[in-house]
Image: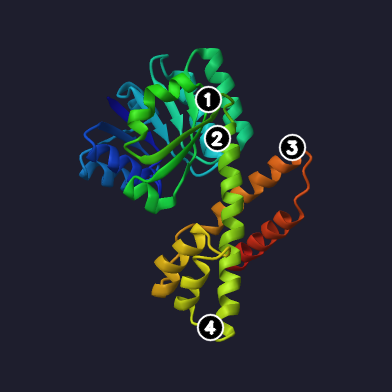
Amino acid sequence: MKIGFIGLGNMGKPMSLNLVDSGYEVIGFDINESAMEVLSKAGGQKANSLDDVIASSDLILTSLPSSAACENVYLGDDGLLAKVPQGIVLVDTSTVAPELEKRIGVQADKKGISFLAAPVSGGVVGAENRSLTFMVGGPKELLESVHPHLMKLGSNIFHISEQYDSGTNAKLINNLLIGFYTAGVAEALTLAEKSGLNLDFLFNVLNVSYGQSRIYERNYKTFMANNDYEPGFALKLLNKDLRFAMDLASDHGVDLPISKALVAFVCSMRNKLV
């Protein structure tokens, strides 16, 4: 199996390196030359263009930072859907606008091209240690055909539905909850510390109470307890995902007042850092 990987950023780089480590022939493409150098040094191959990836792949994975980048790679005049033969399977792991994944899927169907929209959850750590969760929208039979390869990258693969945007919708709900949990943990533990509570002891108490959450456990044990506040996920990306979630709510006529407040807070924090 020859695998192409387009987008070798924070998520794509460790995913592509894990594929190389699993024995696949991997050819990668990114606008950042240094990202391709990392793949090359690990035993992968650098591509000069999308054409190189198409010519050397049976399966192509994409991990792209924005809807604009994803639309260009898939639907551009020189994009994947304009050039890939019908035998190549395309799997997009990006978190982009649901309507874009739907448009890509519809165009792929018209051309007889195999496509899955499969955003992932787990962050960079999950990408590095192969514990990602895939939330997949598209043909179930197609997912079954690539399932063994995706399992080299993650530990949970869910077929949400045949609708191409369904996996992305699930991912946006996931990230909306992450936004709430992360902000809630930060505020609650700040209050706890100011109140004179021992945070290590409090964790043991709350971890067996209804205040427990995986975000609390991860953020506290991995970062806060070790006084590690190095950024792990860009605010602009969280802001992007939350806005996609709000667009989804608007599309379905659902009013989410607390979510609106969260989005406004994240946007204000991002503006302070820009």
Give the amino acid type for the residue marked by disc 4 in the picture: Leu
Q: CA distance from mark 2 to mark 3?
A: 17 Å
Q: Would you call the spot at circle 3 few (<14 residues within 10 Å), some (14-19), or many (20 or more)?
A: few
Q: What residue is rendered at 36% in x and 23% in y?
A: 54
Q: Earlier in the sequence, mark 3 or mark 4?
A: 4
Looking at the image, can residue 240 be seen?
no
Could you tell whether 175 is left or right of 204 in the image? right
Helix or strand or loop: what does disc 4 sit on?
loop
The disc at residue 138 is 1
For the C terminus, which image quadrant? bottom right
Q: Would you name the residue on which mark 3 appears?
A: 251
Looking at the image, can residue 22 be seen?
yes
* Image location (x, y in percent) of residue 77: 52, 24
Q: Would you name the residue on which mark 2 appears?
A: 167
Q: Earlier in the sequence, mark 1 or mark 3?
A: 1
Q: Earlier in the sequence, mark 4 or mark 2?
A: 2
Q: Earlier in the sequence, mark 1 or mark 2?
A: 1
Could you tell me if the residues under marks 1 and 2 are in contact, i.e. CB atoms within 8 Å? yes
Helix or strand or loop: what does disc 1 sit on?
loop
For the N terminus, which image quadrant? top left
* Image location (x, y in percent) of residue 197: 53, 83
Q: What residue is rendered at 62% in x and 65% in y?
A: 269
Residue closer to the observer: 56 or 119: 119
Helix or strand or loop: what does disc 3 sit on?
helix
Could you tell whether 178 is left or right of 114 in the image? right
Could you tell me if the residues under marks 2 and 3 are in contact, i.e. CB atoms within 8 Å? no
Q: Would you name the residue on which mark 4 appears?
A: 197
Helix or strand or loop: what does disc 2 sit on?
helix
* Image location (x, y in percent) of residue 132: 41, 44
Q: Would you call the spot at circle 2 few (<14 residues within 10 Å), some (14-19), or many (20 or more)?
A: many
* Image location (x, y in percent) of residue 34: 31, 48
| Whether residue 13 is situated above or below residue 189 in the rendered picture | above
